[in-house]
Image (spheres, rainbow, N blue to C red):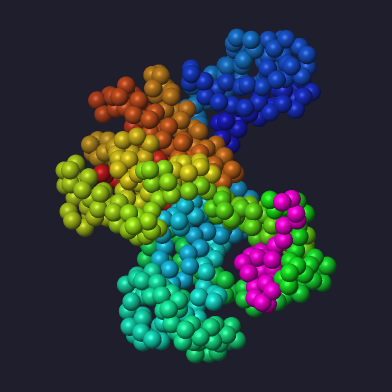
Amino acid sequence: MTSTYETLRSRLQSAFNALEVGADPALRTSDRSDYQANGVMSLAKRLGRPPREVADAVVQALDVEGLASVEIAGPGFLNLTLETSFLDSRLRALRGDARLGIEMGVERRVVIDYSAPNVAKEMHVGHLRSTVIGDALARMNRFAGHEVIARNHVGDWGTPFGMLIEHLLDLGEDQAVATLSIGDLDGFYKEARVKFEADDAFKGRSRARVVALQSGDPETLRLWHVLVNESIAYFSEVYAKLDVTLTPDDVVGESYYNDLLEGVVHDLDAAGLLVESEGALCVFPPGFQNREGQPLPLIVQKSDDGFGYAASDLAAVRDRVNVLRADEMLYVVGAPQVQHLEMVFAVARLAGWLPERVRCEQVVFGNVLGKDHKMFKSREGQSVKLVTLIDEAIERAYVILDERGTDLDGDAKFHLAEQIARAAIKYADLSTERQHDYVFDLERMIAFEGDTGPYLQYAHARVRSIFRRAGDDTPPDAHFALAEAAERELALGLLALPEAFSASLAALQPHRLCTYLFDLAQRFTSFYDACPVLSSEGALRDERLALCDLTARMLRLGLSVLGIDAPEQM
């Protein structure tokens, strides 16, 4: 079903085209709950004609019969007021549509690279944004009808694994597994690092173990798999706490590309792109310079013949294009990685490995800050463990539920506390324009008031409570007269979901959908305060119950594609 906004835009575009110009009028909600098209002023300037004259010409060519009335206001604005009959037909169509007006797109294969923790290290607050934003985009793409291939590009290869394997052997395999299985990855890693720095014999064994690992020694590989598998099991527990859709099958770490690296070097050399610089093999993609204005190299193979991140990332691009047949590749990364990946993509295009048909974008995000507006750290100055944040949020949510006097039993209350905690953490992240930093203030994030995840959950539960009190969970069939201003405001908000979803997904900006949901919840509050529902009678009661039903369904759907639960009661 074509969205209401798109219908208006199409009609307006036809009218502008009738004047033989290709204007693209933008629609926005006016203060009068109508739709205002702003394109006349710039058009008049280009044509050298008075704005009201151009506006009058557009109106004459505009076909909105049965859809809206139009009037010229001020110097030449077009105010369109949607006809109630049109709103009624649209709202009734939405009620019968399980997707609430959001159309399935042409299926594309979308590879999304996100989360990317390191083996034998615990996930911390630095992994939060990539994980939450990436998972929301994965869910949104799936709902839009695309095939999503998630790639959790974990750090599971390299020189640190020599000392980690030797430390495992020193502890004894059973003891090491017991340590890792309780999630004490950081402790294990730090113990190995301390020994590596202090014990020359251990350092020598560790370096020899790296050689054995890289040469494919079976026993060394088996021990390496022990470390990797225990780490992945830990990551899965964290993802479950956050309700993130990543699975062990999505883990494709650096080790996966290890056998492909020599081919990357060989093919770059064959293409004439490799240049030796200070013993390293590099590519100098055009347009990249260092601070001194000199060409900036992408180091593919280091002077010691080892491979860096660039080689792995180039191998990943080739695999995703040639093997996975990606139509689109999204990399959900922090700002410090931007230049590196830009150079990787530039080299891949120079080599012919990244064709123009493949959309390849970095989904860049800002930092998580503490209340002091500095990088979020623990009191000891360490990165805060992600599982610690989640558990603290659950505890706070549980206390809030106690204070609110919920009548749920222990297990049900704890489950609801988990849902609220996840909503608080995810929504605070997703509702922020992703390029911006945001402050992690759990007290604010978990509040039931303001622009928060728990507020939207409560708004949904509040709507659902109306039907429990009505004693009938089946909304009645209804026509929409929309006699009250608050009813019309809510109706206009309900019709905006498809546009909000598509704009958010196209721009890879989940905050746009968050903004829509918060606005919808506020519109519902205004409607509920101004328009009695259960005390109304007859057709008016049916109409208002139907508006409530649509509101609940849209809040639930919008939250779900962001990875947030919508509880029935709170």
Foreground pick, 472 / 38: 38
Quarter in which the N terminus is drawn? top right
Q: Splitting the image into 4 quarters, where does residue 390 fall?
A: bottom left
Say how many tags the image has. 0
| Residue sitting at x 64%, y 78% | 259
Q: Splitting the image into 4 quarters, where does residue 536 fall?
A: top left
Side (left or right) of 58 relative to 8: right
Q: Position of residue 376 (x, y in %)?
A: 40, 50
Q: Position of residue 100 (x, y in %)?
A: 48, 41
User: Is residue 130 shown above or below 544?
Assistant: below
Foreground pick, 441 / 528: 441
Side (left or right) of 113 relative to 546: right
- Is residue 543 part of the magenta span, yes or no? no
Residue 225 seen? no
Q: Splitting the image into 4 quarters, where does residue 403 fall?
A: top left
Side (left or right) of 347 relative to 523: right
| Residue sitting at x 38%, y 86% | 170
Q: Position of residue 369 (x, y in %)?
A: 42, 46
Q: Position of residue 455 (x, y in %)?
A: 33, 39
User: Is residue 368 shown above or below 545?
Assistant: below
The span shown in magenta is 292-320
- Is residue 296 part of the magenta span, yes or no? yes
| Residue sitting at x 78%, y 17% | 47
Foreground pick, 421 / 77: 421
Residue 150 seen? yes
Quarter in which the C terminus is drawn? top left
| Residue sitting at x 41%, y 43% | 373
